[in-house]
Amino acid sequence: MKKKWLAFCIAALVMTLALSSCLAVQAGDHVYFGHYEQDNVTDNGPEPIEWRILEINGNEAMMISLYGLDICPYSTSNTKCSWEKSTIRAWLNDNFYNAAFTDEDKKCIITKELTTKYDPAVTADPVTLITCQDALRIFVDHPDRRATATPYCTAQGVYVSKKFAPATHYWARNPSWEHYDKASYIAASGGVMKCGGPQVTPNYMVRPLIYFDLTSRDLETAPQSQQK
């Protein structure tokens, strides 16, 4: 009887700790996780990546980088390209993933099976992009969807809008619903461009999106004064 009671107490404690970890952050919070070059001064090493928590579902936090971290074409080919076969998907889950996260960090990221509108394949990746549908559903309005580039991203030659500067375009996960050689993106204005832009465009920025396991570790929150 004592052994059963002890086992029950341990299980309850584990559940309590997991719940307290989940409640430590909430949707809308800004947190630090991983590192990537951002200030364009390589001598001081990569900087902590700041993320915005978009949603929390159970133990999963859906997080998007606050800034555009780099540039990459959606595809390097003018032929029809799905998200599954895209250049940017490969780049996110190889170049970016291995540069931004340590082996310990990677244990905290959920490899999520996802479907993408206008692409029939089910993909499973640790790093992805926001969909047009989620961008419309989660962000409050156009200004809320706007994003700017880091100094490093700017130095790579990112496109910057004249009208909405310093905001710039960033890719969404969806291929264009209308054009075989285009991909969807979020415009510098904050508009969701489902018809898309040329998928070979090299200078639209990338805002990686991940699903973080809230039971894996506590996240460091960014100072409230820095949050927009």
Image (cartoon, rainbow, N blue to C red):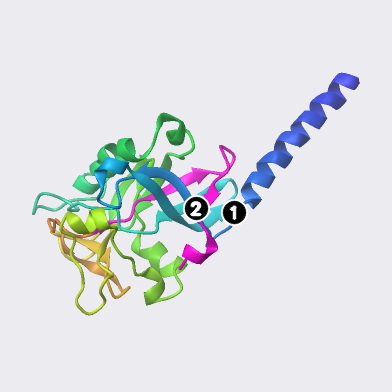
Q: Position of residue 86 (x, y in %)?
A: 21, 47
Q: Position of residue 64 (x, y in %)?
A: 41, 55
Mark 2 crowd level (few <14, some 14–19, many ≥20, 10 Å Cα): many
The dot on residue 31 is 2
Give left or right: position of 77 versus 186. left
Q: Residue at x 25, y 43 (%)?
A: 42
Q: Which residue is mark 1?
A: 25
Kindly give the residue lying farthest to the front in the view shown. Answer: 43
Please state which of residues 134 and 120 is positioned toward the viewer in this rendering: 134
Tell me, yes or no, if residue 17 can be seen here: yes
For the residues bearing labels 1 and 2, Cβ distance under 8 angstroms: yes
Quarter of image, res 102? top left
Q: Is residue 171 magenta?
A: no
Q: Position of residue 12 (x, y in %)?
A: 77, 36
Label 2 sits on what residue type? Val
User: Does 167 sit above or below residue 64?
Assistant: below
Query: Which image quarter holds the C terminus?
Result: bottom left
Label 1 sits on what residue type? Val
What whole-number distance in Å separates the C-alpha atoms at marks 1 and 2? Answer: 9 Å
Q: Is residue 225 magenta?
A: yes
The secondary element bearing badge 1 is classed as loop
Lower position in the chain sequence, tag 1 or tag 2: 1
Please state which of residues 110 and 98 is positioned toward the viewer in this rendering: 98
User: Does 152 sit above or below residue 134?
Assistant: above
Q: Position of residue 15 (x, y in %)?
A: 71, 38
User: Which residues lie in the magenta part?
Assistant: 205-228
The dot on residue 169 is none
Mark 1 crowd level (few <14, some 14–19, many ≥20, 10 Å Cα): some
The secondary element bearing badge 2 is classed as strand
Q: Residue at x 19, y 53 (%)?
A: 74
